[in-house]
Image (cartoon, grey):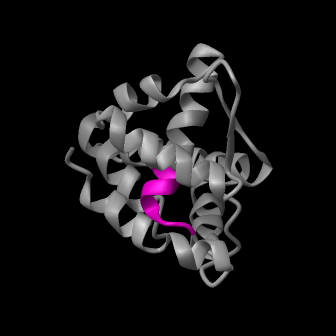
Amino acid sequence: MKIPVIMLKWINTRKLLKEGAVTKIQESAENYLEAILMLQKRNGSVRSIDVAGELEFSKPSVSVAMKNLRENGFIDVEENGHIILLDKGKEIAERMYERHTFLSDWLIQLGVDKKIALDDACRMEHVLSAESFAAMKAYVNGSNKN
């Protein structure tokens, strides 16, 4: 079983997450939560196999990720296998989804190829501070006072 490098980084920080020493979760966890939200919007319900297909990861890798997300209080998994976003998981997923949607739409409007815009937005959404993202939104929406 080959685990993506980004997942290994997340697994290595799991202890710190449990102890509360890290307040920002890893990018891979944000991607999993965002994928769960997107699949819920598209399909109504989500199982691990759906997440594996969406992210093009192996089932064992997704299983490990779902276990970590569950143990850290981001998701719950019902007896029938359906994944439910808990409050803190949903908050992160919605934040990532908003950023992804805004950034990809903006890049496309600027003339960037759609595939490139989607890929770039996926990377950018994780590194922007809340302050920078709010400023970008205000500027794009015409409410920048400068």
Residue at image coords 66%, 46%? 94
Q: Most prominent secondary structure in the magenta stretch?
A: helix
Q: Is residue 80 magenta?
A: no
The foreground one among 20 and 44 is 20
- The residue sitting at the right extreme is 87
Q: Is residue 45 above or below residue 9?
A: above
Please give left or right for residue 5 compared with residue 75 in the image.
Answer: left
Q: Where on the picture, by quarter, is residue 37?
A: top right
Residue at image coords 20%, 48%? 2
The foreground one among 8 and 103 is 8
Quadrant position of the C terminus in the picture: bottom right
Q: Is residue 89 above or below residue 38?
A: below
Q: Position of residue 41 (x, y in %)?
A: 63, 23
Q: Position of residue 118 (x, y in %)?
A: 35, 42
Q: Which residues are magenta?
A: 25-31
**Residue 146 visible, this angle:** no
Residue at image coords 35%, 38%? 60
Q: Where on the picture, by quarter, is residue 124?
A: bottom left
Q: Where on the picture, by quarter, is residue 81?
A: top right
Q: Is residue 142 above or below residue 10?
A: above
Quadrant position of the N terminus in the picture: top left
Q: Position of residue 139 (x, y in %)?
A: 60, 63
Residue at image coords 65%, 16%? 44
- The residue sitting at the bottom extreme is 21
Q: Is residue 14 above or below residue 42?
A: below
The foreground one among 139 and 82 is 82
